[in-house]
Amino acid sequence: MVGPTRALRCSLACPLFFISVASLIWSVVICCNLTTPQIKREEVVKELNCSTKMLCFLSMAFTGIWIPGLVAWLELDKVNLRGWRKLFQIFNSWMGVCIVLLLGVGSRHFRNAVLLKYINYLKKLFHSNEVNPSSRFVYTNGYRFEYKNYYYQ
């Protein structure tokens, strides 16, 4: 690999890998302790459970991505590793999508914000009073929207 020496690459990549392994261990320990929460409010416990599980999956994905990254960066045994580099670049570039999917979609607040944006978009799109698809969504208790189905009430 043209560029920095192997010692410099090792000083950049190895701490990142060890930090990702430590975060994976830390999040697994926290996930194991979710059965006995110290917080008594049920809504907060549900939100923290979901967020913690998504962070655990994210740290697993990050550690899994940096395993081929270490192999590609450190050039083990001076073998031709162009395939590993391409694999690492592809997976590392899609890490942002994984963050949005794992942390965003796993959060109730994120889903509600996206749904509210979608409802406002539909209101703007169908501005007349005859066709108003957002009238079937009701903002219930401050945490979620519910779909009113008039046929099964």
Image (cartoon, rainbow, N blue to C red):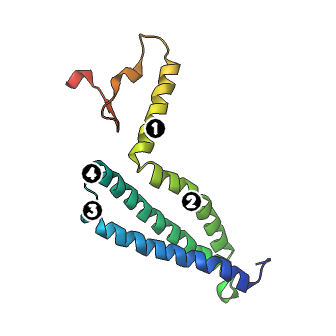
Q: Which of marks 1 and 2 is nearer the N terminus?
A: 2
Pointers 3 and 4 in contact (C-beta within 8 Å) = no
The first of marks 1 and 4 along the sequence is: 4
Which secondary structure, mark 1? helix
Q: Marks 3 and 1: which is nearer the front?
A: 3
Give me the disc on residue 37.
Answer: 3
The span from disc 1 to disc 4 (Cα, nearest Å) is 22 Å
Compute the Cα span from label 3 to label 4. 10 Å
Q: Which residue is drawn at 27% across and 62% down?
A: 37
Q: What separation in Å lies between label 1 and label 2 (alpha carbons)?
A: 22 Å
Amino acid beneath label 4 = Arg
CB under 8 Å between discs 1 and 4: no
- Circle nearer the N terminus (2, 3): 3
Residue 77 in the image: x percent, y percent?
A: 66, 89
Q: Which of 61 and 1 is in front in this view?
A: 61
Q: Residue furthest right?
A: 2
Which residue is disc 2 drawn over? 95
Which residue in the protein does label 1 denote? 113
User: Mark number for residue 41?
Assistant: 4
Q: Residue 15 carries which label?
A: none
Spot occupied by residue 70 in the image (x, y as percentages of width and height): 61, 78
Residue type, mark 1 in image: Ala
Q: Spatial distance from mark 3 to mark 1, Cα to Cα?
A: 27 Å
Q: Classify the position of the N terminus by image quarter.
A: bottom right
